[in-house]
Amino acid sequence: MRKLIAAALIYATLFAQSQLLSPIPVPTNVIIDLDPQTYDDDALHEALDNGEIFTFLAKSSHTQDEQLRQLRQNYMALFSLRSRVFTGQAIRVAFIVPYKIIGKYASSTTDSALAYLLARGLPFQMDTIAVEDESQTSLATALEQIESGHYDLVVAPLTPAGAQFYCDRTLTTRFYIPTLHKKRVACENTMVYFGGIDYEKQIETLALLTEENATTITVSDHSSVSQMLTRLVNEHLQVDRHIELPQTGYYKDLIERYDDLNQSDIFLNTPVVKSSLFLSQLTLADFKPQRILSTQINYSPLLLTLTQYHDRDAMVVSSSIGTVDPVLAEEISLINRDIRFNWINYATVVGLDQIYSSRTSEPRMSKESFDNNSLAYDIYLYDVGLFRFVPRALPEPESSMMKEDTIEESVYPSSSME
């Protein structure tokens, strides 16, 4: 028996894995410009044409040409290069995490931000201020710690109630709220920035796909997001019927009460698991909608695994997740965090990237920028295909129907599932 215990301890010692970050920094290459000559954009293009890649990298940090900036970013990622040695003070970021309110997003957003800062390779300090909830006492205590900490940025994944608390305060530090679009809060505070997606803009785009004489039906549950989406659909379309799903997960009897589900336009405003159950039971009831439309709420690979293709072949999903540096995306995925489909993680990284770049003068790793203190996102449409989300062309605003042709994936973000 003693021999068995000893052998087990030796095995555990040999194969145990530490959960601590290694203090050894990730190796990087540094490119230093020692040539006093200045290169304009024409000279940079000439350097590229001559194959002088490292000359281009050494001289292109100042360019405002979007094509040259993108080429610079691609080459920097390819060679794991940093353009200069950072001599300024370390950037300081704080996270306010109301863990009982945002649940799983507490660790997800902080992990994604940490991976981003590590990928940048410059000195930083990141502190987490955990609060139980969004009560005024909790948020005020967090604000006191922020004011004494001299941070460059506070990232606060909050609900509208928590965001409103900080909007109504005098702030000396920039607050970034990745969970909300500015439309959801009455906020005139210039120190508060928002990164949430614009569901209304997504619905406006999806509404262009509907036919004028089609029966339009909304499907929701009791959640606040689902109810908000249904309200937005009602504001932009004439809705003929609203169906609210029960908590049971069994919907076939409910579905069979409504014959007009056949050949209808359905706005599916439920989370991905409930949506998958609804779609499968819609097929079971032998109903075939004309089209099924949904927002970011169902842009998830789970939809592909929880449904069969014939359940979703008439479905179109909108998304605002664009592209970030591919190396960054892979490094974040290594810690089991996703920014290709998880829009809150994506918003956290993109907003942090925008503010980080303005603070350090480092090139951007994403393309979205702030407009009136809110991140401005593009809209992408996808057919829910057999194995992946297939990009579709955006409909023309003056047209009531979208062309059925798909377009090349190269103009779409790399988040489409292969």
Image (cartoon, rainbow, N blue to C red):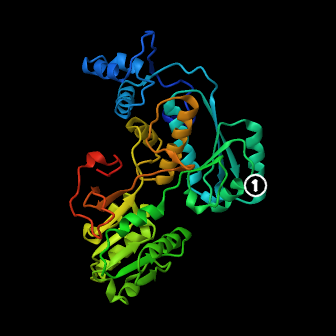
Instruction: Say few, some or many: other residues with alpha carbon within 10 Å of mark 1 (under 14 / 14 to 19 / 20 or more).
Output: some
Residue 13 as seen in the image, left or right of residue 284: right
Whether residue 291 is visible, yes or no, is yes
Spot the residue most to the top. 35
Q: Where is residue 103 shown, x and y percent of the image?
A: 59, 57
Residue 160 as seen in the image, left or right of residue 231: right
Q: Amino acid at mark 1?
A: Ser
Whether residue 8 is visible, yes or no, is no
Image point 38% across, 27% down: which residue? 72
Q: Which quadrant is the N terminus positioned in? A: top right
Q: Where is residue 288 shown, x and y percent of the image?
A: 27, 79
SS at mark 1 in the image = helix
Up/down of 261 relative to 309, above or below: below
For the image, the number of numbered tags is 1
Residue 345 as seen in the image, left or right of residue 341: right
Residue 43 or residue 77, whichever sits in front: 43
Image point 41% across, 51% down: which residue? 321
Up/down of 148 relative to 263, above or below: above
Image point 32% across, 65% down: which residue? 316
The residue to which callout 1 is attached is 138
Find residue 249 and report its image quarter.
Answer: bottom left
Find residue 297 and report its image quarter.
Answer: bottom left
Residue 128 or residue 363, whichever sits in front: 363
